[in-house]
Image: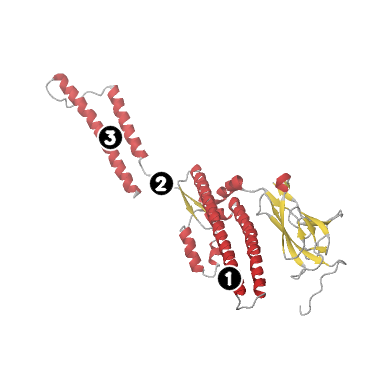
Amino acid sequence: MNDSKTRVWTRLSLAGVLVVLFAGITVGGAMIGAQDGTKTVDNPAPLDEATQRAIDAAVKKALAQAEADKPQPRRTAYVDFLTLLKSDKPLAIKQQEEAEKMDETMADIEKRWGDEIKAQQRERELHKPNTHEYRQAMQRQLDAAKNMYEEKLQYEQLAKSELRDFGIDRFKALKNLAADMAKEVGYNEVLNIVHDIEDVTAQEDSFQALQQQLLISPVLYYEPEHDITAKVQAEADKRWGSNISIVPFDAKTGSGGVSFTIEGGATKLKRNADGEIEIRLGQNGNFAVEVLEKDQHAEGDKAKVRWSKRGINVGDLGADGGYKAPDTFPLAGDTFVITARSAVDPTVSEDVTIRLLDKDGNRMKAKEGE
């Protein structure tokens, strides 16, 4: 198609040149014929300088126009866009924030309506099943359960919609970045590729997964030197990346990670052979972790973390890392997890397992049958 168009433009441009030349010769002949008043001269005199310059300019313009109108050849760059999207820091932060917000909101909804459901359950127990009071309590209990479900569903849909809109914005930003960087180095087209197709085909339905990826990336072969994924990724990290990190726990040296200092103590507790921090029932203390910015000790807001715990009746944990262990062992067991998460970049976190000991420093006795 491109060759055909090129031939057409070439013919048109040559035709334009011939018209100009023919017009110039005709005008020259007419002028010469007019001078002697009898006939057209077969061999006209050379054109004057001004006329020649005009013809040369017309020819040059026609050739330039023909060259400018020629379709440009394809110069294709390749980008693993899924990798860029998965590595996008703003999107990862938004996902983490939405997940935390959803957990908190769902817990609040369940507690609020759960209290009402339990209250109506107790009301039912005060009356016989065939009484009006019993039926009213039953209806209120059902209504509360229905309202709880609807409120949770509505919030979940709202959160998904907000996250989808943010994801679309990030898609556009990365797409524009890839296009701009490609044009800067002389490309006029960018195609999506998939680097790790093995990860996709490892799924249970490999053929279907492969079909989906081929729809995303129909490129079966490309020259690696035209893969600009790393360059786009580096620029994306420079623009939107995070320099925050948390010093991880080093099992060999026993340093780093989340630490715990007993109230009034001067040294951090050492972890046991399993990497757990052992805290006695009723003890008070403070958790801490070292946050880095560009591999240097972070200061101010950059050093702040949010603390959370996973477990029921495992003690009280403050926003500043202050902790008071429970006075008795939780029914669910004597271990739970503490998480320190960067306040600036919530995708950066560090976990530690806490093992509760009795007040004499002994582990909880195993129940019979365990």
Q: How is the image coloured?
A: secondary structure
The nearer-to-camera label among 3 and 1 is 1
Residues under labels 2 and 3: Cα distance? 25 Å
Among the two numbered marks 3 and 1 on one chain, the one whose residue lies closer to the N terminus: 3
Give SS at disc 2. loop
Residue pictured at 62% horizontal, 48% vertical: 241
Q: Quick one: label 3, few (<14), some, or many (20+) residues within 10 Å?
A: many
Residue pictured at 40% horizontal, 46% vertical: 73
| Marker count (numbered) | 3
* Camera-side residue of 19 and 105: 105
Q: 23 above or below 187? A: above
User: Can you identify the residue that label 1 sits on?
Assistant: 139
Give SS at disc 3. helix
Residues under labels 3 and 1: Cα distance? 92 Å
Residues under labels 1 and 2: Cα distance? 73 Å
Q: Position of residue 54 (x, y in %)?
A: 30, 26
Type of amino acid under label 3: Val
